[in-house]
Image (cartoon, grey):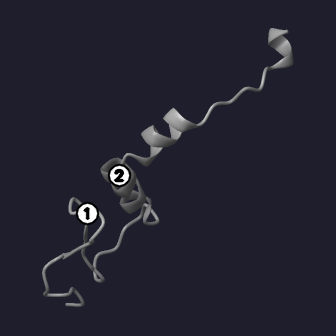
Amino acid sequence: MGDAKKDALRVGFDSRLKLKFLGSQMTTDAGLLAYRELDEALGLTEKGAELLQDSRRSRAWR
């Protein structure tokens, strides 16, 4: 009860992703699992790590 009976929706910009409404299922992870799966599918963390550099130096290393 409460779940959609339709198939998952595919997004146009990346066919690996699909959106599915599961309204009656509860989670204790505050929805963060969905963000992790999206990040893994798109590779955002890896792309960000490749593009960003931290040039700060700690005073302990001077």
Q: At numbered mark 2, what does the secondary structure look like: helix, strand or loop?
A: helix
- 1 left or right of 52? left
Q: Residue furthest bottom?
A: 1
- 52 left or right of 50? right
Where residue 22 appears, as percent x and y from the top left, is 26, 78
Mark 1 surroundings within 10 Å by alpha-carbon count, few (fewer than 14), some (14 through 19), many (20 or more): some
In this rendering, the answer to whether 18 lies above or below 46 is below
Label placed on residue 47:
none
Looking at the image, which is closer to me, 42 or 8?
42
Q: At numbered mark 1, what does the secondary structure look like: helix, strand or loop?
A: loop
Residue for badge 1: 17
In percent of the image, x 21 and y 86: which residue is there? 3
Say whether marks 2 and 1 touch (CB < 8 Å): yes
In percent of the image, x 27 and y 62: which residue is there? 14
Which quadrant of the figure has residue 6? bottom left
Where residue 62 appears, as percent x and y from the top left, is 85, 9
Residue for badge 2: 42
Which quadrant of the figure has residue 20? bottom left
In percent of the image, x 44 and y 59: which residue is there? 32
Amino acid beneath label 2: Leu
Amino acid beneath label 1: Leu
| Alpha carbon separation for disc pair 2 and 1 | 9 Å
In this rendering, the answer to whether 3 lies above or below 50 is below
Mark 2 surroundings within 10 Å by alpha-carbon count, few (fewer than 14), some (14 through 19), many (20 or more): some
Mark 2 or mark 1: whose residue is earlier in sequence:
1
In this rendering, the answer to whether 59 lies above or below 1 is above
Image quarter in which the N terminus is found: bottom left
Q: Count the marks: how many?
A: 2
In percent of the image, x 28 and y 76: which residue is there? 25
